[in-house]
Amino acid sequence: VLTMALSLWLLWMCLSRAAMPFGLMRRELACEGYPIELRCPGSDVIMIETANYGRTDDKICDADPFQMENVQCYQPDAFKIMSHRCNNRTQCVVVAGADVFPDPCPGTYKYLEIQYECVPYIFVCPGTLMRVLEPSSVREAEHQSGAWCKDPLQAGDRLYVMPWTPYRTDMLYEYASWDDYIQNRVTTTYKLPSRVDGTGFVVYDGAVFYNKERTRNIVKYDLRTRIKSGEAIIATANYHDTSPYRWGGKSDIDLAVDEHGLWVIYATEANSGRLVVSQVNPYTLRFEGTWQTSFEKRMASDAFVACGILYAVRSVYQDDDSEVGGDLILYAYDTRRNHEEPVRIPFPNPYQHISSISYNPRDNQLYVWNNYIVLRYPLEFSPPQPTTGQHFDNLHCSGGLIEISESFLSGFPFPTTLFSVWQLYSFLLLSVRHSGIASYQCMADDVVWNPRGPDLSNCTSPWVNQVAQKIKSGENAAHIAAVLVNHTRGRVYAGDVTSSVRLMEQLLDILDSQLQALRPGNNEPATRNYNKLQKRERTCRAFIQVIMQHTITVDNLLRLEALESWQDMNVTEQSHTATMLLDVMEKGAFLLANNLYGGHFSDRAPNVDLEVYVLNTEMELKDLSFPNSYDSDSTIHVSASTIKQYSRNGQVKVVFTLYKNLGSFLSTQNATLKTDGEQKSGAHSLAVNSHIISASMNKESSRVFLTKPVEFTLRHLQLENHFNPNCSFWNYSERSMTGQWSSHGCRRLHSNNTHTTCACSHLTNFAVLMNHQQPAVSLTHSHTHGLILFVITWVGMVISLVCLALCISTFCCLRGLQSDRTTIHKNLCLTLFISQLLFLIGMDKTHYTVVCPVLAGLLHFFLLSVFCWLCMETVQLYVLMVEVFESETSRRKYYYLSAYGFPTLVVAISTAIDYRSYGGPKACWLRVDNYFIWTFIGPASLVILVRLIFLFIYNIFTIYLTYLHLCISITLLLLVSLTWIFGLLFMNDNSVVMAYLFTSFNALHGMLIFLLHCALQKKVQKEYGKCLRQSSCCGHASSTGSLKSSAHRGNNRYYGGSQSRHARIRRVWNDTVRRQTESSFMAAEINNTPTLTRGTMGNHLLANPMLQTRSGSSPYNTLLAETFNPPSPAVFNATGQCVCDEEHCFVCFRCVYLYSLVFLCISSLLSCSVLSLYELIYRHVQKLKYGHMFTLSVRLCFFHFHAAPSFSPPCCVYSVIQIKHGKKHNC
């Protein structure tokens, strides 16, 4: 019987020490004038959650009716006052009255209502000991030797004192405070069950530990029950003056406490009388670790442990004043690193007889008894050293939870070693965004942190308490619901998710009680009933607003950004919170249905869909289908006969709900499913592979049983590596909010790769569970692909950035290239350079909550600018064809306004609509799940369309010189467009092929622009040559003349007084043709001197019927024809070129044309082949029987080249293959 009683008592002690599970609140209430007492078991401390002093209910603390009328009485500072008085204490007593709280409403009889939690108090190591400061508290004692200390796990100021007298020490004295000790006012006296050897006692968690006289035993004596609760023996320890400290006093066995718990310091014969330190479990008295040192125990005056480091103190005594060195802490042994070292930390000791030193980890001070004097020494610590991630064999982990009870910043990387978790203190104190307990489990077998990461279920933001206070104060429920929506739109933490669901439930309870109170009574006057009905109508409107706000809140909690916070919970808390969310949504929907007199209520959000029906069963009913949206591929159907079956008083209430992103948080453990169907070998796990769809009628229980099964169809979320679908429902308890998946009463009607149709004999929350098998080689392949893509991205894009930088420097530094077209190329390279730089360094910075959206916005702007500058290049080509004479004014300002103004407008509008969609969980780019990506696709497509319109609005293809520029422009447009087509496809389905194509094409931009606009351009080559000649020792004079003449050509060239009209027109035409020819790297080979008399292109144009003499008085009709002389035979007669004679004067550009066309066709066909193959494979895999089939259709339109009607010279015949509707035509 005694053994059983002792076992039960130990079990009670262990349970009392266990941390209260999150969400298990304690509630205390006291009427005005009465005390309220808060108490936590063991070492747990109080954490105030809510506090209300006033009156919000007329049924609590009855008094005179006049004093209970005001139910809007609330003291806003009650929470702050109670937190200041009671937080971090094990017990707290407060009198509810004006002495503590300012009176918020005189004349009203008030009460104090408190909700609080009991949480563990956790110590965090302050660092390494650096200095012992001068004593702060000094008092003279009656005994020369003794010990005193405080309980580090008690928040009060109680002191424990034990004067030591040889063979007669068995009394322990408790003082309520330091003042009581100075005045010698003893609060309690404890008679210990046995006498004490030495002064090495400690008090820890309400129990005193000491060395029993003449034994190796440690005794634990509980100060609350006043019984001996444990005794343990140190088998090898020296005792009873065998190896005492230097001062003697039978101090062979010394006890100490620090941030890590209870320690025993002693010596053994096996260690030659040197110090040995052991860590002891204070509740079981089991030894958890032992470390042997090389420091002789008799050389130390005393020792203590701080932060797991043993410090030995040497003191000068009265009989050895001549000893050199004075009082020092001269030895330290780090138990966490198995490292010892000599130290020299001065220890102020004016009294020369230290008999005990106790370290208190709560206030980081030493409690010293020194030659009739009691002292308290403050300590100074250095900041904690960063962890090295090393692992030591002596590091033991109990497999429990290490909890950090200061402010915790989500995303902070926990240390890789158990010892280093105590070094977080300095960082955690800086975190003020949210507070709570972050628990990180140490796996005992491997001595590593739990790979799931820390449990942040109890980390909440400050607004949670603020909203709770608003609910307590009785504010408008619709307003509180709107506040809750605004808070959940931003960053939420794990504790915020759970707290938000609870707050929603509290709001529903308040509104339900208000509506119940407003129901008309049979025995009440008609006037009062009428007033109640009016108030009830207003409350119902507010209730509808609350339900709508609740839908938005749930949608906020299920959006992609909030799912990371769900992952920070442990599995049990995830399942519990998800179950509460299901129940709260259904509860709110039926409360709304109970107050609707008929009709239909619907509310839809991206992640949750709600519909409520109140149907009159006396009328003809139709089958109900949910949801009614055209784009939904998960549906449920309830027949009219089933609806009539559950009619109550001619009415039936039906609630449908669809949840996205919630199924993964309802645990599949302990699921009871059918084992029939497809099975595959290998390890596999169970996963929820569909959305959750819910249906219920009249809310009689969590399940509504039917005579005719209800059918529903759910789409599979993942197609690969998932098999054996099971039609399941979430079977949960409304009391405990815990449940499990079950397939009882459900059967599978049909299933294919994408959908499953089920039939169940009851209504509840349904989903499809499937077995999931992860390929064994996926991790290796993923790592290989990731490495290859990383190399392609960095190497390719660095080369691309270097090429773009060369282009920018070329266009900016070479004065001979300055023109409107060069300005376009310069800005194109600049915007592309910035875009690729942002992509390279900022795409993966998703953990920066502010920087990531900014980077996404900048990338959005500069990519749109790239497309705009490509469009400006086409506009410039169009302008050159329309204008014969060069404009005196530059169009650069219009180009700048268009190319930068349009992207600015798009980004500004996008930011105003939804700025939160910049930056996602995977990349710092635009979100693709909510169609925000169309703010890039739409404007980019519009710019491309405008570009194509300019190409076809005027027959630019009629002149081959412009066509050469056009080929370059089209090639760049094709490259940029294909790059982001592949990018969007990759972001949509994470295809490895698309990833390779996207990174490869993205790296080609800079190289292609440098080749086409710089390296192959004859004019640029000439400018490079001029720069090289100017930088050499000779050739200065010859190189500057052309630059100067080119730069200073003005109107006098065309309007000199001595020139005839024929000469002016001739010069205008020569300059125009030369300007077009020099800017082409191909045309310069055909004609290096394009003049009116020698240029074959100009000769052809003059012979063209479009430019022949016509009737009229215009000088242009005669001067051109008069000045034309038939040219001599063409100088070009090489193999493979056309032969031109006097009749066929036009230089054939067939080869040039076909070279460009072949280049364009090859690149287009390559991309077309890849996409066609992708579509073919996709169609083959998808073989759907359902009509919801997404097909990828990519159409590559090849340009339809037409010869102008007016352009028909007697030239060499050439043909162009035109691809149009799969047919071939000859031009």
Image (cartoon, grey):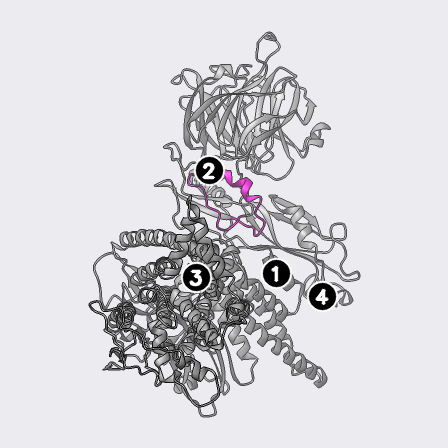
Between discs 2 and 4, the one toward the N terminus? 4
The region drawn magenta spans 408-437
Q: Residue furthest right?
A: 107
Position of residue 250 measured from the top left corner of the image (x, y, whole percent) = 52, 17
Q: Few, some or many C-alpha atoms within 10 Å of disc 3 (few <14, some 14-19, many ≥20)? A: many
User: Closer to the observer: label 2 or label 1?
Assistant: 2
Residue 8 colored in magenta in the image: no
Label 3 and label 2: CA atoms lie apart by 36 Å
- Residue position for label 1: 468
Q: Is residue 638 left or right of residue 596?
A: left
Label 4 and label 3: CA atoms lie apart by 36 Å
Amino acid carrying label 1: it is Ala
Query: Are discs 2 and 1 less than 8 Å apart at CB?
Result: no
Q: Is residue 1117 left or right of residue 138?
A: left
User: Closer to the observer: label 2 or label 4?
Assistant: 2
Residue 539, above or below 461: below
Q: Secondary structure at mark 1?
A: helix
Label 3 and label 1: CA atoms lie apart by 24 Å
Amino acid carrying label 4: it is Gln
- Relative to the observer, which residue lies in front, 1161 or 881? 881
Question: Is the stretch drawn in magenta largely helix, strand or loop?
Answer: loop
Position of residue 1090 measured from the top left corner of the image (x, y, whole percent) = 37, 68
Q: Secondary structure at mark 2?
A: helix
Position of residue 218 measured from the top left corner of the image (x, y, whole percent) = 48, 27
